[in-house]
Image (spheres, rainbow, N blue to C red):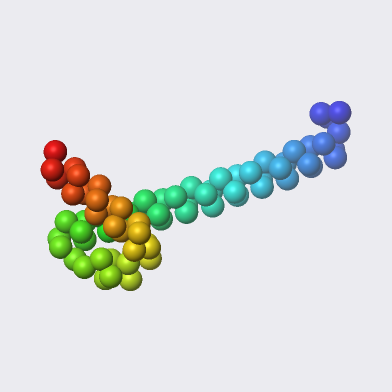
Amino acid sequence: MRESVIYQDILQEGLAQGLEQGLEQGLEQGIEQKAQEIATNMLNEGVAIALIVRVTGLTVEQVQQLQAQTNHNQAE
């Protein structure tokens, strides 16, 4: 069965789809992580949350959560 052309075609198609999905997910995670890093830096510089939201594309809740984490880390 593993030597059949059809099996090999299906296997290659599945591998290609898996690779594409993995790359997309990795890229999305990387973009999200970079936006959070930029937002954290902006928070440390005292930039208003509304501006951070506009610049990074993060939600207000996400920025507020980062702010809480930043404040907590600075208190330690």
Q: Would you say 61 lies left or right of 20 here? A: left
Q: Position of residue 27 (x, y in %)?
A: 47, 52
**Residue that appears at 15% across and 60% down:** 45
Q: Is residue 4 or residue 19 the one in the foreground?
A: 19
Relative to residue 26, is residue 43 depicted above or below? below
Q: Position of residue 68 (x, y in %)?
A: 24, 51
Q: Is residue 72 or residue 34 the one in the foreground?
A: 72
Q: Position of residue 49 (x, y in %)?
A: 25, 66
Q: Position of residue 31 (x, y in %)?
A: 41, 55
Relative to residue 37, is residue 57 depicted above or below? below
Q: Would you say 24 lies left or right of 72 here? A: right
Quadrant containing the C terminus is top left
Q: Is residue 58 or residue 7 the one in the foreground?
A: 58
**Residue that appears at 66% across and 46% down:** 16
Relative to residue 51, is residue 76 depicted above or below? above
Q: Quadrant of residue 56 in the image?
A: bottom left
Q: Quadrant of residue 61 in the image?
A: bottom left
* Number of marks present in the image shown: 0
**Residue that appears at 15% across and 63% down:** 46
Quadrant containing the N terminus is top right
Q: Quadrant of residue 12 in the image?
A: top right
Tell me if I can see residue 35 in this picture: no
**Residue that appears at 66% across and 47% down:** 17
Q: Would you say 74 lies left or right of 52 here? A: left
Tell me if I can see residue 53 in this picture: yes
Q: Is residue 19 or residue 45 the one in the foreground?
A: 45
